[in-house]
């Protein structure tokens, strides 16, 4: 089954053609980073207008790269929520128009469910259930037990800022620009992760919280404002902040692994691209006897918002309905 999928939840216009939920025939992503760097973050109205400009060229490119015609497409999938209202509307209206014109079924997909199946994309062996999934992105932070496609149990979530949002805001405080995740990680490699002891909120509780950490960094920088001109100082703060985020995420993940009988642990979402987080999870799982298999997206493009994951989620969720 070939699904043409559209993802426009935030500031990336993406169209993909996915076969049987795993084989990616094309996955085109038009980024708006250059536009939003000017304002240091995503402006919703600008993002929506850019989706309108990019949609048709991206759609054409995805079809050309997949080497398919409209007759080869069996269904249309699109991100329904959550996201920026204007951005979502562009994708949903495009998908609805295609489904109507082609007389194809339309599959609305939850954006986070897309991230959760991003590890199904690729040529490796299909993941085995039950799977424990840590999803970490700019807008979402959940720890989810997945017993089957469409069978999700949310074990923990962020009560305020997500980890990705905290990365963006701290990067702005440090003058590192947008997007914050890659900038923080790059500077953190050069710094001392134990230079500053930032807090890890809700350490004994199940949920996540990163707003307090962001505030702690803000007041620390205000107190040491004169030091911001020094690269070494910025590197140490970036490394210490990243360490606090990683520690909070990994502690709760490992605690869940020890409490549950799962076959695999998956890291998904934009922050899944962070090498420090990947390495720490792998290291901590290595301390557990008979540890579950650890996976993260096969390609960096599958970490960030992309249409391939939406096509995969549409396929597997609808397959599960008819079993």
Image (cartoon, grey):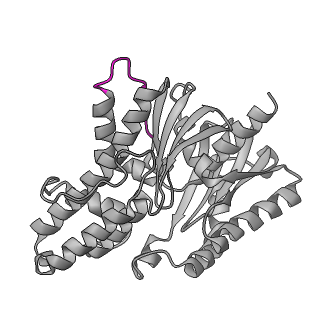
| Identity of the residue drawn at 14% across and 57% down | 191
Residue displayed at 22% across by 62% down: 238
In this view of the protein, can residue 117 be seen by the observer? no
The range drawn in magenta is 286-297
Q: Examine the structure image and report whether residue 157 is included in the region drawn in magenta.
A: no
Secondary structure mostly seen in the magenta stretch: loop
Quadrant (top left/top right/bottom left/bottom right) for the C terminus? top right
Q: Is residue 130 left or right of residue 239?
A: right
Left or right of 29: which side holds 92?
Answer: right
Q: Nearer the viewer, residue 224 or 266?
A: 224
Q: Please give left or right for residue 64 compared with residue 163 in the image.
A: right
Indicate the quadrant containing the N terminus: top left, top right, bottom left or bottom right: top right
Name above or below for residue 249 compared with residue 165: above
**Residue 169 appears in the picture as rendered:** yes
Task: Give the vertical position of 64 relative to 256 (above or below).
Answer: below
Residue at left offset 64%, top offset 67%: 57
Q: Position of residue 310 (x, y in %)?
A: 64, 49
> Relative to residue 175, is residue 186 depicted above or below?
above
Q: Position of residue 77 (x, y in %)?
A: 73, 52
Report the side of 38 relative to 130 (left or right). left
């Amino acid at each position: 089954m070939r699904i043409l999928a559209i993802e426009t939840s935030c500031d990336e216009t993406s169209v993909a053609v996915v076969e049987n939920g795993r084989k990616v025939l094309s996955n085109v992503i038009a980024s708006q980073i250059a536009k939003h760097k000017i304002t240091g973050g995503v402006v919703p109205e600008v993002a929506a207008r850019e989706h309108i400009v990019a949609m048709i060229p991206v759609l054409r490119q995805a079809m050309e790269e997949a080497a398919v015609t409209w007759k080869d497409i069996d269904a249309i999938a699109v991100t329904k929520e959550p996201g920026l209202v204007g951005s979502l509307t562009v994708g949903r209206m495009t998908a609805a128009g295609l489904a109507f014109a082609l007389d194809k079924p339309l599959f609305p997909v939850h954006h986070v469910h897309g991230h959760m199946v991003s590890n199904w994309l690729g040529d490796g062996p299909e993941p085995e259930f039950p799977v424990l999934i840590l999803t970490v992105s700019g807008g979402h932070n959940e720890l989810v037990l997945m017993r089957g496609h469409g069978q999700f149990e949310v074990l923990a979530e962020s009560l305020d800022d997500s980890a990705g949002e905290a990365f963006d805001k701290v990067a702005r405080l440090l003058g590192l620009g947008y997007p914050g995740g890659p900038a923080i990680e790059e500077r953190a490699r050069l710094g001392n992760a134990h230079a500053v002891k930032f807090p890890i909120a809700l350490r004994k509780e199940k949920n996540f919280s990163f707003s307090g950490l962001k505030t702690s960094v803000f007041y620390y920088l205000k107190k040491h404002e004169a030091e911001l001109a020094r690269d070494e100082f910025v590197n140490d703060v970036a490394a210490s902040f990243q360490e606090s985020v990683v520690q909070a995420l990994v502690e709760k993940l490992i605690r869940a692994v020890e409490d549950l009988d799962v076959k695999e642990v998956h890291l998904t979402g934009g922050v899944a691209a962070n090498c420090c987080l990947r390495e720490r999870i792998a290291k901590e799982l290595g301390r557990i006897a008979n540890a579950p298999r650890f996976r993260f997206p096969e390609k960096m493009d599958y970490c960030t918002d992309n249409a391939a994951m939406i096509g995969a989620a549409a396929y597997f969720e609808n397959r599960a309905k008819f079993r």
